[in-house]
Amino acid sequence: MIWAKRAIVSCLVLILSLSPTLPRLGSVPGAAQAAAAGPAIHLEPFLSGLSGPIYLTSARDGSNRLFVVEQAGVIKVVPPGSAVPTVFLDIRGTVLSGGEQGLLGLAFHPQFASNRRFFVDYTRRPDGATVIAEYQASVADPDVAGAAETVLLTIAQPFSNHNGGMIGFGADGFLYIGVGDGGSGNDPGDRAQDLDELLGKILRIDVDNPDPDDPSIPYSSPSTNPFIGVGRAEIFAYGLRNPWRFSFDRLTGDLVAGDVGQSAREEIDLVTIGGNYGWRVREGGTCTNNDPGLCDAPGFTPPLVDYAHSGGRCSVTGGYVYRGTLGSVPAGTYVFGDFCTGEIFQREGAGMSLLLDTGLNISSFGEDEAGEIYVVNLGGTIDRIATGGVGCTFALGSTGKSFPPRARSGRVSVSAPAACTWSAASNASWISLTSGASGAGSGAVRYAVASNADDPNPRTGTLTIAGRTFTVTQAGSPSACRASISPTTKSFSPSGGTGAVAVTIGASCGWTAVSNAGWISITAGSSGTGNGTVSYSAAPGSGIRRGTVTIAGRTFRVVSH
């Protein structure tokens, strides 16, 4: 998705990418040495069978779910330990998809765990405008989004290419938006340098507070944005051609953007407030001759790194600064790639070295909650970057374990070559890791299983260990739904009266209360789950009367005399 033909071998171009801490690319002096020594990483298959995937991210809500964006207009959710994604949101009827257009970006609110808010960037039918919109996850099912849409911002697009598309929240809590220059070639409207245009920019908006001057606008511009009063208030930085993917370094907060070039150079920029990154005057570190008189003008921020279209490279795909715990690459390493060659690089001093030549069309990189990095292939697959060559294979001593209802503990052995790192995570709240959350080479994971004595139903949960799934099953307790009631009897005078009965039973056990006498009525608590109370009334009557109420399978006796 989002590719345009590039001069030089008419290669499809990926819109662009951004990322946190940058690579200082050069010409790639380390590539030959890396190839000779063997790959420094390998790719572990994660998902396949996708349709045009262009992004992967997490909600960072503690659920360890991953979300995959497909260009046509679908977001899929992948529960932890699963390889079967399900549909989270489907807006294909709204999205104009094809070429560089489609559903391009996804960002979860920093308080998503409590407010369920998330945001998307898509190309609108039928006019091709860029839309930034808000949705919410369902209260009933967090793996499904509600259909209600709130449009925050609409940006008209003069051409179909260079739409940008990346959105993400910074540490300041504001939403950052990457917008391309409007398309065609060489920015014919000079929009990237025009502060009255939103095209060719990084925008920053506050989605928690509406515009104070017009409450009908559901966002505001932070007061520290640099061009309030002299240009569009939303602009954070300008002079960009097509920022496709960007990211924030989890440790430093740095915003790094990979800006896809025209026909000569690719660049990576450290994006700072008010910065002018030179397009259309400059492409990378060179003058484009679109405006030759401006090439040496002051005020342009040079790229951290730029590299030439050589060896088939033609479109930078920005990645992430590695902050994971598995040691997939050294901590702090910036990982990025090229869409046209499928090469994955790492920043190395003032240049870059080859980590792996994949042959994939790398539409994006992604990051999970733990900071591990994934490679998104436009052709329909997603892989996780893992340390070492293909010799890093992992095996578990068993694939599962069954337990009785009471609390127990268990152990899983891991077999792996000495240099291969792995991690373990629980995907169920009732299973906790007690040791072995990460390791290198062979080792063991120990875990504890909470009691299920209050539930008659069995349950199943999983651990993800070294990318493998270990399944834990636990039996329910037959005695959990044995109820007791208090009191068990009650006497009334002929004038009748009211009363209540307390029910004590397992928390997940359902029960009912039924009167077996016409003169006894249930007034509240005719059914419930877990502990509860049944309220009843006895009607007035003469003579001696005896009746019963069946409550949670127990008999409550009522006498009137």
Image (spheres, rainbow, N blue to C red):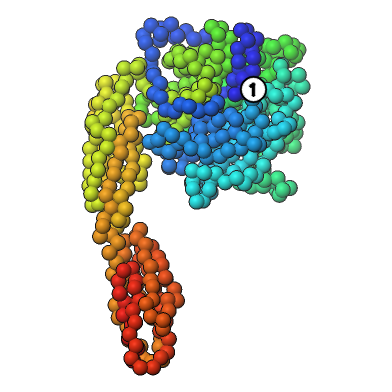
Residue 8 lies in quadrant: top right
For the C terminus, give its image quadrant.
bottom left
For the N terminus, give its image quadrant.
top right
Q: Residue at x 37, y 77 (%)?
A: 516
Q: Position of residue 256 (x, y in %)?
A: 55, 26
Assign a secondary structure to mark 1: loop
Q: Position of residue 319 (x, y in %)?
A: 50, 24
Q: Position of residue 437 (x, y in %)?
A: 30, 35
Q: Residue at x 52, y 44 (%)?
A: 144
Q: Is residue 441 left or right of residue 94?
A: left
User: On screen, 233 above or below 454?
Assistant: above
Visible residue check, residue 299: no
Q: Residue at x 62, y 46 (%)?
A: 148
Q: Which residue is mark 1?
A: 99
User: On screen, 201 above or below 37?
Assistant: below
Q: Is residue 235 left or right of residue 551?
A: right
> Is 183 in front, or is 265?
183
Visible residue check, residue 56: yes
Q: Residues within 10 Å of mark 1 (few under 14, many from 20)?
A: some
Q: Is residue 487 left or right of residue 351?
A: left
Q: Residue at x 44, y 22 (%)?
A: 333
Q: Position of residue 23 (x, y in %)?
A: 50, 19
User: On screen, 15 above or below 251?
Assistant: above
Point out the residue furthest to the bottom here: 543
Q: Is residue 356 left or right of residue 105?
A: left
